[in-house]
């Protein structure tokens, strides 16, 4: 099993939004970074565990857990000119962008803030706390996963 962290701005899509979706499942669309796309396409597997991270908000941090419910498939929002994620260079015959489906597991008992994560020497190798890392999807090691959960 792999472990991940996926960021979303809570004003756009929050852990509560995921909870309220039919079947508590939703596609994770709109990823327009090749490195993140490659992780979704090549590495994310059914059942992988994922931290839901609220970003670009008053108190960014890990707020919940979800799991990969469907492995990578073409991001259909890239083909829709009415969608904000439309990419005119993406072709359904050879899709440029990929998405996965995620399923709600639970909301954490408290938000584990970015500030707190940065203060922990045990997480110094976590991509999230490294300077300049702006990816919306990043791998988390099993040790990092367990340590972050121990902070709850």
Image: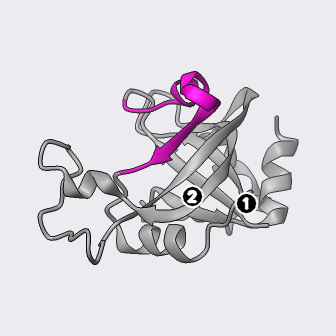
Up the image or down, 30 lies above or below 10; here it is below
Q: Does residue 27 show up magenta in the picture? A: yes
In this rendered view, identify the residue nearer to me: 128 or 32. 32
Of the two numbered discs 2 and 1 on the same chain, state the one appearing first in sequence. 1
Instruction: Indicate how the structure is coloured in the image.
Output: one colour
From which residue to which does the magenta span run? 12-29
Crowding at mark 1 (Cα within 10 Å: few <14, some 14-19, many 20+): some
Q: CA distance from mark 2 to mark 1?
A: 9 Å
Residue drawn at point x = 28 percent, y = 78 percent: 94
Q: From the viewer's perspective, is 8 left or right of 94?
A: right
| SS type, badge 2 | helix
Question: Badges 2 and 1: C-beta atoms under 8 Å apart?
Answer: yes
Res 151 → quadrant: top right
Is residue 35 something that shows in the picture? yes
Tell me if residue 114 can be seen: no
Q: Is residue 47 above or below residue 27?
A: below
List x then y, in percent, for residue 85: 24, 50
Query: Front-most of 18 and 124?
Result: 18
Residue 22 falls within the magenta-colored stretch: yes
Question: Which residue is tagged 1?
Answer: 123
Relative to residue 14, is residue 80 drawn left or right?
left
Q: In x, y percent, where is residue 23?
A: 63, 31
Residue beneath disc 2: 128
Q: Is residue 82 above or below residue 138?
A: above
Residue at image x 68%, y 69%? 125
Residue 65 picture location, percent across and down: 70, 41
| Location of the C terminus (image quadrant) | top right
Q: Residue at x 20, y 43 (%)?
A: 83
């Amino acid at each position: 099993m792999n472990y991940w962290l996926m960021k979303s701005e809570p004003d756009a899509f929050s852990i509560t939004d995921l909870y309220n979706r039919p079947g508590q499942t939703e596609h994770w669309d709109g990823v327009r970074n090749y490195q993140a796309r490659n992780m979704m396409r090549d590495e994310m597997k059914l059942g992988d565990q994922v931290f839901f991270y609220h970003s670009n908000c008053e108190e960014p941090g890990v707020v919940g857990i979800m799991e990969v419910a469907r492995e990578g498939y073409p991001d259909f929002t890239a083909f829709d000119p009415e969608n904000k994620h439309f990419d005119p260079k993406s072709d359904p015959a050879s899709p440029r962008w990929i998405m996965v489906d995620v399923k709600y597991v639970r909301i954490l008992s408290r938000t584990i803030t970015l500030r707190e994560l940065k203060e922990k020497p045990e997480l110094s190798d976590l991509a999230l706390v490294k300077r300049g890392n702006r990816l919306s999807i990043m791998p988390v090691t099993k040790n990092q996963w367990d340590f972050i959960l121990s902070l709850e």
